[in-house]
Image: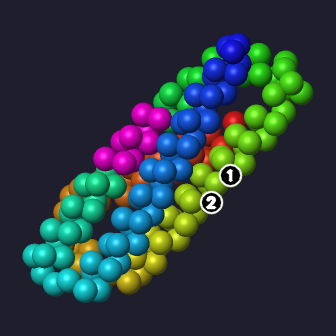
Amino acid sequence: MNEIEVKLDILERSVDKKIKLLNQIYNITENQQLFVKTLEGEQRQEYLSSAAEEKQKLIDEILKIDTVFISTFESFNGMLNKNRKLYRERILKLQEKIRLVVDIDVKIRVKEERNRQIFAPSVLNGLSPNIKALKANKSYILEQYEKNSKQ
């Protein structure tokens, strides 16, 4: 296997991991709505805090994957462009996976917005600092995905 193929493999594995992690974030976000609707008081806060902590761990993992993706891509982008025709199928496959990442990203944003509209102000005021920090980190990661997908 040559260097370009190895690096394309790294990129594909990175995107596959991101897809898996983003799907987990989506599921957690979906469950947060369920927690708010079905649980009360301290139990609800515990579940929401736990969900926020889990989402934060996943986001941190995604940020690490993004770092690997970007550095790998930048390390051979010139070689890849010179050999674009030779690796056309692999590039198209990778682009399709990146589009899937963007689609999942949009689903997460929509679900987050719906949750914000559904959560009563009293529930939002009681959220732990982790959840508030998560919103900022989530915005950052989503911006990074958009940036990566354009590359």
What residue would you read off at disc 2? Answer: 103
Find the magenta span and give its range: 57-65
- Left or right, 92 with respect to 29, comes to right
Residue drawn 36% across and 42% down? 60
Residue 35 in sight here: yes
Residue drawn 18% across and 76% down? 44
- Left or right, 85 with respect to 116, comes to right
Task: Looking at the picture, tell me which residue is in the foreground, 121 or 37.
Answer: 37
Task: Tell me if residue 37 is in the magenta stretch.
Answer: no
Task: Looking at the picture, tell me which residue is in the foreground, 128 or 104.
Answer: 104
**Residue type at numbered disc 1:** Arg
Residue 121 in sight here: no
| Residue 42 circle label | none
Image quadrant where residue 71 sits: top right
Q: Quote the CA–CA distance across marks 1 and 2.
A: 6 Å
Image quadrant where residue 8 sits: top right
Q: Is mark 2 on a helix, strand or loop?
A: helix
Q: Which colour scheme is used?
A: rainbow
Expressed as whole percent of the image width and height from the top left, the position of residue 39 reads: 20, 83
Quarter of the figure with the N terminus: top right
- Left or right, 16 with respect to 100, comes to left
Marks 1 and 2 in Cβ contact (< 8 Å): yes
Within 10 angstroms of label 1, few (less than 14), some, or many (20 or more) residues?
some
Task: Tell me if residue 60 is in the magenta stretch.
Answer: yes
Expressed as whole percent of the image width and height from the top left, the position of residue 90 reads: 76, 34
Expressed as whole percent of the image width and height from the top left, the position of residue 97 reads: 66, 47
What predominant SS class does the magenta segment belong to?
helix
**Residue type at numbered disc 2:** Asp
Q: Is mark 1 on a helix, strand or loop?
A: helix
What residue would you read off at disc 1? Answer: 99
Image quadrant where residue 31 sits: bottom left
